[in-house]
Image (cartoon, coloured by chain):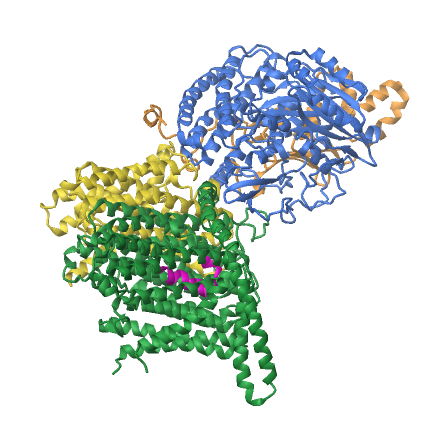
Amino acid sequence: MVSLGETLFYTVIVCYGLSMILPLLFIRNYKYGVRTGLVFTALASIMQIVLAVYVFLTNTAIVINDLISIDVFASYFLALVGLAGLATSIYGLEYMDLYVEIGGGWLYSIVFAAFLLSMTLLPMMKDLLLFVFFWEVMTLTSIVLIGWEYREGFVVRATKQYMFTMLLLNSIPLIMGTCILWNIYGTTNLGLLASYDVVKNPLGLLVVLLFYIAFTSKAGLFPLHYWLPDAHPAAPSNVSSLLSGVMIKMGVMGIIVILYKYLGLPTILSYLLLVQALLSIFWGSIKAVMEDHAKRLLAYSSISQIGYITAPIALAFIASRTDPLLASIMLGAGLSYMFIHSLFKTLLFLTSGCFLYVSGKIMLDEIRGMAWTSKTLVLSIIIAGFSLAGIPPLAGFMAKIMVYGSILLGKNIVHGLVVAILMSMAPLTLLYSIKYVSSTTSLSSKIELGKSIGTSMKIGMIIPALALIVLSIVSLNKFFTNLSSILLGIRVETIIPSLTDFFYLVINPYIFYGSLIVFAALIIAVIVSYSDYKNGKDIISKGVWTTGYIIPVNKHLIRPSYYYFEINKALSPLTGFFHEIYECLVWNIPSRIVRNGIARRIAEYFGRVNDWVWRKLCGFAEKYSRYEEYKLDEYAGSAIVSIIRLIGNIARMAVVSPIALFTIALFFLSIIMLLIILFLGGWP
Amino acid sequence: MNMRKYFEKTDKWVVTFRYPLEPLEPPKELRGKPEIDPDLCIGCGACAQACPPNAITVHTDYDEGLKKVRIFYGRCIYCGRCWEVCPEGAIKLTNFFEMATPNKEDLVYEVVLPLHRCPRCGNYLEFTERQVHRAYTLLTRLPEERRKELLERMFLCRDCRRQVFSLEEFKNRRRDKYVQASQTPF
Amino acid sequence: MMDYLVYLAWSIILLLTALIMAPLLDGVRRVIRAKVQRRIGPPVLQTFYDLRKLFGLPSLIPYRNYLLVLVPYLVFFVVVLLSILVPIPFVISPSSTVDIISFIYILLFASAILIYAALIIPNPYSNAGSIRELLLITLFELFVAFTIVGLAYRIGTLNMYLLGIRYGWTEYYLKPSTLLLSLSLLIIAYVEGAYTPFDIGEAETEVLGGPYLEYGGKYYGLLLYALLIKRYVLLALPVSLVFVSPIINYVADIFNGFTLMVLSYGLFIIFMFLTMMLFSVIEAFNPRYRVDIVYKPILVSALIPIIGFILGWFGW
Amino acid sequence: MVNFWIRKVEDLSKEELLEIIDRELKGLVTDKYVPTNNFVVYFAEREKIPAIIEKLMEFSYTRLSVIAGNDERYYMNKLSLTYIIAFDKQDLYIGIRTYLPFYDPVAPSITDMVKAAWWNERENRDLFGIEFSGLKDKRKLVLPEYWPDNVHPWRKDYPYNKPVMDWREGLPDYTPVRETKDVDVIGFGPYHMVNDEPIHWRLYVKGEVIVDAEHRGFHNWRGIEKIAEGRLTYNQIPFIAERICGICGFTHATAYVQAIESLARIDIPDRARYIRSLMLEIERIESHLLWIGIACHILGFDTGFMLSWKTREHIMHLAEVLTGNRKTYGMDIVGGVRRDVLGDRINKAIDTVKKIRAEYKELYNMLINNTILVKRTRGVGVLPREKAISYGVVGPVARGAGLDIDVRKDHPYAAYKELSFNVPVYSEGDVLAITLVRLDEVFESLDLIEQILDKLPKGPIMAEVKEIPANKEAVGVVEAPRGEDIHYVRSGEYNKIQRWRVRAPSYANIPPVREMLIGYRLADAPIIYASVDPCLACTERYLVIDIETGKKTIISDEELKAKSRKLSKTMG
């Protein structure tokens, strides 16, 4: 007898599976190939949101089998991935028309679905081997998606960099660690591993270190963040919103679940995590302030935001031995920040995609004032940008203030210092977010663009915007605190009231009066000013004041890239220095290795093989095409032909050769994955 | 910044005052609004000659027989040249300075003097009666017979003079005298 | 039920206080500055006259864009509603529902909205002014952060109402750390209030009023009023904490509830005027900073709350 | 040769220098003519001009003071240019005159060699239609953009009272030169907070940092010299000359009457000379105090503004007592001064000077000890010495840049030979240096006033002047509060003036502001621009607007007083 929860779970899987299979019917037609896939991913996302809500309400874990079980914590990530996936899928329906000339819509939807599915399944995994497997799937799919625009030079470079990084810092450490654990304990079941005291074992400690490296590099924490600002902008915008909104949080998830919950995290590593968090806040913020490329700015901002997410979590790990209540509150703050950040970062990347869609430009100076092509865009930019800046009453402010408050609960001087540092770095967030918001919604130049953004894109942006508004009124702090308390295995509700007078906010579970005031002001102001705006006959508007001479308006301003001119001049030596170091470490050396290495030969070999197969199959198809009853075969055959042709084309290009490898690997992996899920599920 | 030294001042602390509400007493040397004394002015127009910005102008109206010495304070630069050149001391500079006004007409001041009328033909001369009278007072310095022969002609206009006196001029005058007499304005 | 009535009454009283006191304080400031400059200066009610004149004029904005119409109202209503949260000790008001962090952040919201509206207008003067304002906020945030944290660690609460009451307790008040924190609260009120050495954002003679440049008539009146109320609110925090709270705590056990409220309210008003006089005297003796020489004094002055915070943690 | 002169020229006497110049210019110049004892005119072909200027500029520190164009078709059917070059250490002005045929009025440009010629050449092109070959800057300087190109208002065939068009029609228009791909544009003026008089600086900025600037001024130019040449007699001009500028008007009047006196060989009585110096110093003090107040206001320091103007009020009152007017003293007239300093006014003046010195000392300390004020001005708007020389800047700007020039010492006029004073010189060239120069000069002027009042000789105050000789020329130089104010005058028939060229100090000091602005921030632009104490009235030679006379009404003083009080109430 299959329970409701399991049914929902299987529906999700099946929807993803359909979105991977059905596009194969539309190989010839790019748009159908994309849209069928995305429709089904959207369905799957809705399904998994429903599943998450169901799990949260019933508050009981759905155990599929001993390898997969959906507990409340997994349901949190289900909801996170679901919201982001829904928004991006619906957005992509029309947005992907940008990439028609690249082709391979069916491949895109396969990869996209596989990416989402892997991130959906990761938190449910109770087995390390499966975890690593889906982690790899996530990495490979993300590589292909980042390298989707494989004709662009910077995309190729970013993809290669990302791929080397993930090979060195994710795949190898994870697989090595898994093997070591298998060798020591003879199992990869996380529940069993938790029972052993892994950290005591020196090899186990090594494993923990390896995993730590893997997860922090995926999360984009400071020293290992270098791939992020190149990789995220390279992808199509709805993909990069997934990367920034969801994928980097998988690293945090790994730290919390695998390291902290099952394997156990040494305190020194928690302190290291804290330091890394603070450093990435600082570094990401100043780099974002200095950035003029909209998507890179957002990418850097997610580096700094991941710092805001991990700082309370690290403190929670530190405090969990002594004061689990405090730890759970901090962890709750971190989780709530993570959730809200995923929402507004998704939204921000989607908005930046709109500019690519309407004008193909992305530099802040060039997209100045383009947001006025649609009111929805302007509104979502303002909501998301001000949430990012942490301006009341928006959700970002709730998250920030909960982080501050929860950390301030700790009486230690470290907590005070951390809060002081976080607060004093918050205005940097304001600096770069207002740079993005004000430049895109500037009134400077009224551009007449041929295209306007499509309805599905608007819907895709409205979904997270609405979620943000709801979250800014209704605070889920209690939910997140419960969540973390369940994770840490303690009960919070009984003890909380004793803290009431210290810090009001964390305790007040449902609504926040500070925001209420701003909302009241907003409502009054809207009412008054709208009537004023409508019937205001005494409003004189004669353009800006140019002190007596006529100066063209598009010149008569301070352009966004010069907002913080002095800051750029002051900090450019420092950033340049770091840039040089990273350039040498992560780009020059590895690329040289690969150039002269085996990868090129493999690529050439594949190219030759593909040519042979292609010739044969084409001949086959043409031979039998004249017979009616072979049409189906012809279609099927041509499908395979074009798959192989695509593979071959990718393989031929020496520069993108590694991507070719991974694409091929992915194709088989995704099929294997489907079978695994279905069989593990105990289906016939 | 020595705030302490700044605050220990002995003289009156607040130095400003509400000017339009309180009267402001200018020093007696102030070169203020020039005024023409209508009783003294003879309308010679020396001031109009000297005035750099042409604030003082002289208009002669032969129909009504009036000479108007008009001073327009809107153009006056209060240099006091008129005061210096006035032969009669009719112009003096008051120390009155508050002349802001919404309409320019308030700034016009005119002295209207009657022109001298020729007793013979009844035309107006370009001189005012006062000028002629001033000239008449000048005659007192002259010797008796000279004054008599000038008195006969000084009130007439040029044409009458020419008509009346030309004949016996030619008769019983030496040429140089004639020249001299005709050159004197009256 | 009675409680809610008292809440409501005090909220209304505080609201009206802000609306009346803000221009009045500005008038006092102008008069004092004039006296320091040895002028007669304007009458105390001059700011009221200015506001009346501004609200009478037709309102001027560069473009007929709804954002530009919305922003002045928004800023104004936010600061007005914020003024009911001033933590006058023992005065039962909604101040017990919020904490000082959100208080500061809502003030930041008011500035940020104004800055945003000035940045989207294509006028380099207003852009430059708002960028200066941004940089000043950014630089000064270190100071603010350590002050807040120091308060949390010294007084043990961030709730506005409780701060107002507890700040004056003798075991807290007469300590070096608390004195340093009081000083830094006053400095926050001075710097965020954009009094003269720190008015680089509005700098009249350099960027023609910065963010306020493109608004005229009624909208400028609203923004000006909002600025004055913002100054009032910023000033009300240190006044009620540093000056009113100890005195009220001293006499707390003599009087009963209602008298105490009225007393502390009266003290609050008096000390507001006194502090504003002090501010205006300081203001009269300082030229304007430039944004690239202001960072040094601001960052150095952040040592005050930092030392206060550390001493507070040690309990001194 | 260059080093040789640089070593020697400082301590040459005037005669030695003159014969050296003769030797140098032999073959280049055709003729020589000495109108007055400190003004020597060489005649040269127009092709030789750059060579001559180059030779003369090789002497250590010579200034190109002014290029005076003239329309001499009445005499020889030619246009003429006179390059007046100042030798400050020898009290000598060398004029190089070249005649341009009327049908092709083209002269070689020397702007690349001497920056000081930049504005002069553009002005002559606008007003006389003289083309300068090789002048890169094609913009109009004086006339508006929409002025017809073939109309040149300073040629004699252009009537002084009939404009070809209405000055007020059309918007102020300006076509910028720099292309703005990588920079943003800020219009600074004409209607700007700190612009007391209209001027337009087009600033090209990156963020707040100024990378380039362009100037467009002369919004109020009305050709005051044309009026003087057209209808006024030589003795009316002092009053209109005084109204060239509201702040340093007396220096203009003095410069003009000195020119007339030197060309008519009139020597004026001693008492008049002393009274002139007295008024000049009084004017200097009030101008400097006014500037200090404005600077404080620009830097947001209104207290300093109020206090310096409070101190200024005493000197204004003194001027009112001595001359009968706060400004535009109306004292100067050819041959002397019009008012004597009589009776107790001397004691009153002495008391006022004492009071001012006491108050000013406190103000001085207050400003000097104010750290923010010093920080705002130190190292801002630096004008290096070489550029200062090339632009031929004068007055406090030059003295702040380390050039020790002061007309009072170098070309002593009214009574300055007999008086002892020293000239403050600073070498930094930034705004602080210029400010300090002005601050110190106030003390010097106070001393000077005391000296003058101390040794004020007895005697008449005016020499009788009937006629002035025709077709004579001279330069009159006065150290205005802003620097050297030079008037080139050529007399015509019937006591009229044939040519009158006014080169006010700001005319030499405003062009380098462009160089001073580059590299500094928008916040510094007002104080940098104000540091040269720009007097656009002088630079652009305003004229009082003509008002037609109204009809006859006579209003009593009481009514008028009431009206004006009421008006000022409603205004204030």
Look at the picture and state if D338 lies above or below A541: above
Look at the picture and state if D488 lies above or below A222: above
Task: Residue at 51% x, 23% y: name it.
Answer: D437
Q: Splitting the image into 4 quarters, where does residue D96 fall?
A: top right
Q: In the orientation shown, which residue stands out farthest toward the left? A: C254
Task: Residue at 50% x, 77% y: name it.
Answer: A32
Residue A368, image x and y in percent?
A: 51, 56
Q: Colour of chain D?
A: blue
Q: Give me the chain that's yellow.
A: C
Q: Quadrant of the C terminus of chain A?
A: bottom left
Q: Splitting the image into 4 quarters, where does residue D555 fall?
A: top right
Q: Give me the chain that's orange.
A: B
Q: Colour of chain A?
A: green
For the stretch drawn in magenta, what is the main secondary structure? helix
Residue D370, image x and y in percent?
A: 40, 29
Horizontal side of D234 relative to A175 (left or right) equals right
Q: What segment carries the magenta color?
A: A231-249
Q: Quadrant of the N terminus of chain A?
A: bottom left
Task: Residue at 65% x, 38% y: name it.
Answer: D221
Q: Is residue B18 at all visible to an observer of this figure? A: yes
